[in-house]
Amino acid sequence: MTSATLGVSTSPVEVTNISPYGFWLLLNGEELFLPFADFPWFRDAPVGKIVHVELPSEGHLYWPDLDVDLAVDSIRYPEHFPLVSQAVSQIG
């Protein structure tokens, strides 16, 4: 028996996987990885709040349950965005 082909995604952005190190977004067919080391706002967030992501405008992601806004370019080109969160690391 073969499975039916899945339908077309209705969302231009979705979280496809979460690991202990970060999570992957699928954005209009492009896969992006957000490591928790670089995006600490997500490290201790519940899965339901991470997967609730919106694309309010082209190039702008928003997690309403976490009140986190990110420019897509800050994920693609983190070296162009040297500012680092002041969040205190909980590792160790």
Image: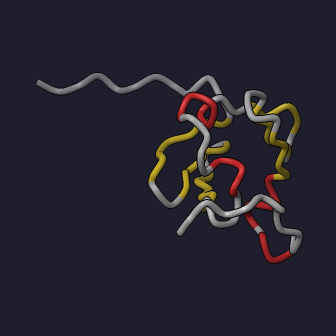
Horizontal and vertical percent position of residue 38: 69, 65
Tell whether 50 sits left or right of 86: left
Q: How is the image coloured?
A: secondary structure
Horizontal and vertical percent position of residue 28: 67, 42
Q: Residue furthest left?
A: 1
Which residue occupies the foreground of this view, 84 or 28?
84
Residue name at image x 85 percent, y 47 percent: 59
Horizontal and vertical percent position of residue 49: 63, 31
Residue name at image x 82 percent, y 49 percent: 70
Horizontal and vertical percent position of residue 18: 48, 47
Which residue occupies the foreground of this view, 40 or 5?
40
- The correct choice, above or below, for 25 with respect to 90 in the image is above
- The correct choice, above or below, for 89 with respect to 29 in the image is below
Which residue occupies the foreground of this view, 52 or 13?
52
Residue name at image x 79 percent, y 41 percent: 61
- The correct choice, above or below, for 64 with respect to 44 in the image is above
The image quadrant of residue 67 is top right
The image quadrant of residue 55 is top right
- The correct choice, above or below, for 56 with respect to 44 in the image is above
Where's the N terminus, which quadrant?
A: top left
Tell whether 46 sits left or right of 38: left
The image quadrant of residue 54 is top right
Residue name at image x 61 percent, y 60 percent: 90
Tell whether 38 sits left or right of 55: left
Which residue occupies the foreground of this view, 27 or 66?
66
Total of numbered circles in the picture?
0
